[in-house]
Every structure is written in structure tokens, then in C-alpha cells.
Image (cartoon, rainbow, N blue to C red):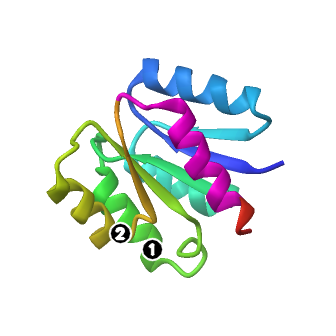
Amino acid sequence: MYKILLVEDNEMNRDMLSRRLLRKGYQVVIAVDGQQGIDSAKSECPDLILMDMSLPVLDGWDATRQLKELQETKHIPVIALTAHAMSSDRDKAFEVGCDDFDTKPVEWERLLGKIQGYLKEL
């Protein structure tokens, strides 16, 4: 069973995504801010991270940058989730180390396809 770390501060988004991931058979670990995301990635060793970019405490941009600098987490694929759909946001996500990018509101089938694509590579 694959483990996905969902880093999302919005309760409604967190609930919707976690329920859908659980129904697809994934184990889900939740973090509500960027620092919790880093701590959870280090302690839980997820197979993939879904990272909201607009987070309290430490935003998703900085959290991803730090995760990609750490030896124990740099190999974990990170999919950025953001309501900002501008090409500059997409470019910034890749600059900080995200492996992929998806916009909110989430189109579930598209996001699921991306998740499955990364997990097949493991």
C-alpha cells in the first residue's frame, strides 16, 4: 500500500482529498502546515507528497525547497497544489523542486493520473 502525505491547511480540501485517496487504497498522512509537512515526511517516509503552496507557518514553496535539500526526503515526488494557475506559479513550483503541478479546485481524475504515474515509477 502506497503512503501519501497530504499537506493542506484547508479542512474541506483536506477532507475531500483524503477520503478519495483512502477509497483508492492509499494510506494517507495529514499535515496542516509546511513545517508539519517536513516533519511528517521525515518520520513517515511517504511515497509521494501532495503539497499545498499557500500554507501557514512555512509555505509550500519553502517546505518543498527544504524537503528537496534533505538527503532522506529529496527522492520523494512532490506534486504542488495551488489555486494560482499562472505560468509563473508553475515555473516557481518547478524551481523549488516540485516534480509536478496541479491547480485547485482539483480535477480528481487528472490528479489521480499524476499520482498513479509517479507511484508506478517506484
Q: Relative to 105, does residue 115 appear above or below in the rendering?
A: below
* Helix, strand or loop for disc 2: helix
Residue 68 marker: 1
In percent of width and height, residue 22 lies at: 73, 30
Residue 86 in the figure: left or right of residue 82? left
Q: Relative to 16, does residue 100 appear above or below in the rendering?
A: below
Residue 47 in the figure: left or right of residue 104? right
Q: Which residue is mark 2?
A: 65
Q: Relative to 97, does residue 18 appear above or below in the rendering?
A: above
Most foreground residue, 64 or 24: 24
Inspect the magenta stretch and tell me whether residue 34 lies in it.
no
Most foreground residue, 30 or 87: 87
Inspect the magenta stretch and tell me whether residue 113 lies in it.
yes
Question: Cα distance, mark 1 to mark 2?
Answer: 5 Å
Q: Quadrant of residue 6?
A: top right
Going by the numbered disc 2, the residue's amino acid type is Arg
Going by the numbered disc 1, the residue's amino acid type is Lys
Q: Classify mark 2: residues with Cα within 10 Å, few (<14), some (14-19) or many (20+).
A: some
User: Which region shows up in magenta?
Assistant: 105-119
Most foreground residue, 68 or 91: 91
